[in-house]
Amino acid sequence: MWINTVGFGLVGLLVICLSHWIRKWRNPKCNGILPPGSMGFPLIGETLPLIIPSYSLDLHPFIKTRIQRYGPIFKTSIAGKPAVISVDPEFNNFLFQQEGRLVELWYMDTFSNIFAHEGESRTNAVGALHKYVRSIFLNHFGTESLKEKLLPQLEQVVNKSLSAWSSQASVEVKHVSSAMVLDFSAKQIFSYDAENSPENLSEAYSRIIDSFMSFPLNIPGTAYHQCLKSQKKVMSMLKDLLNERRTSPESHRGDFLDQISNDMEKEKFLTEGFIVQLIFGGLFATFESVSAVMALAFTKLSEHPSVLEEMIAEHEAILKNRENPNSPLTWDEYKSMTFTLQVINETLRLGNVAPGILRRALKDIPVQGFTIPAGWTIMLVTSALQLSPNTFHNPLEFNPWRWKELDSRVISKNFMPFGGGNRQCAGAEYSRVFMATFFHVLVTKYRWTIIKGAKISRNPILGFGKGVHIKFSKK
């Protein structure tokens, strides 16, 4: 009898402890009033409904339903961490200006682990380190570099790629454009030769992307385990390249890697681990963003022939205005592509390549009568700004002409495809020039037909999915 009593007592104690733990989970401590919302289940929070793919260009259902229920700022839990999600434009713009004061750049543990090198993770560069990183990327991919040397190189690689694609029955455009962009970016960074390298970078990054949003279980056979294996292989290759540049002056090529390896002598923060992370992350950013937007652009152009007709007319006019129609594209010609840049902006607006930008609160942050506690993650949903009917009439409609009427001040506050504040992507102009150059070659030299369309499939972190198969042919 006493054994049963003790057993029932232990069960009762366990139930009490479990109930207390769940109550604490659902009601976190706060020096004020938390925003409305739900913390979901213990440990996993509301992670699962957040990462379920959406099949629309509209806001992800997880976010849209909670806005309707709780308002523009609400609490939740992502991957076991308490978080606040904000679609409030004024608050989001305010936080972009508070980098290093109220908030800091933040990534989920899965993301940080993928970008770590041998256990070292410094994804949150601040101060002089962030200034240096931005400066060196702008030096090799910014406006001056684009004007002086990259533009003709971009046109050459686009010509070569489209020629190769046209020889095939069809290509999956996101896959092949990812490889095109990654190979070119890697060539600028460390003189990567895609045709002769023993490591196929685009295939490695494809494996990483495919399992990026998987549950972080590092067990053989899981998607996350495969992701980390590919990551380690690429990191090891980059580490070997860096060591070769540092020890063998004859291997120098005058590229990004040469500059940063030389700077290691005078900048103490430039450790081997950080440089490997930096290059890995820079390639990751170019690999996913441009290709996702291009895949979506093909889909939208096929649905809107009047848009394609105006693009063709714009680029044929550029050829007619040249003394030699076969001369390379110039910077002035790029800047004259008014309508093409409107098409790119409209695709970026709908594509939302990075719709959720993460920050962490450094101190308690008051907002609209609520308090976001220090240490909490904040997801700033910039896609909500770009899909707001208050700014963009019929926001889900693909309408490049809308950009003629929009005021530059309105655009700066409501259009953030490359982030905002001092964290805006240093490769923003590089991405636009790459896409504009691609479309210039495409519409002046090629015809194309969608053989197999794609259903829109996306989650709040990554952009437009795969599945657009296209047949290219020369005019």
Image: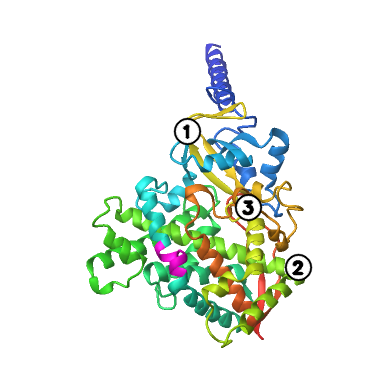
Whether residue 98 appears in this view of the structure is: yes
How crowded is the residue under tag 1: few (<14 C-alpha within 10 Å), some, or many (20+)?
some
The residue under the point 77% across, 53% down is 394
Q: Nearer the viewer, residue 58 or 170?
A: 58
Q: Amino acid at mark 1?
A: Gly
Kindly report the distance in space between the C-alpha atoms of the residues bearing marks 2 and 3: 25 Å
Horizontal arrangement in the rendering, residue 429 relative to residue 411 (left or right) = left
| Residue 264, quarter of the rendered image | bottom left
How crowded is the residue under tag 3: few (<14 C-alpha within 10 Å), some, or many (20+)?
some
Sequence order check: which comes first, mark 3 or mark 1? 1
Q: Is residue 185 magenta?
A: no
> Residue 418: percent from the left, percent from the top?
55, 55
Kindly report the distance in space between the C-alpha atoms of the residues bearing marks 3 and 1: 31 Å
Magenta highlight range: 139-146
Residue denoted by label 1: 375
Q: Main secondary structure of the magenta part?
A: helix
Name the element at disc 2.
Answer: helix
Q: Amino acid at mark 3?
A: Ile
Residue denoted by label 2: 303
Q: Nearer the viewer, residue 462 or 260?
A: 260
Q: Amino acid at mark 2?
A: Glu
> Residue 45: percent from the left, percent from the top?
58, 36
Residue denoted by label 3: 411
* Quadrant where the C terminus is found in the figure: bottom right
Q: Nearer the viewer, residue 430 or 360?
A: 430
Q: Is residue 140 magenta?
A: yes
Name the element at disc 1.
Answer: loop
Toward the top, the furthest residue is 2
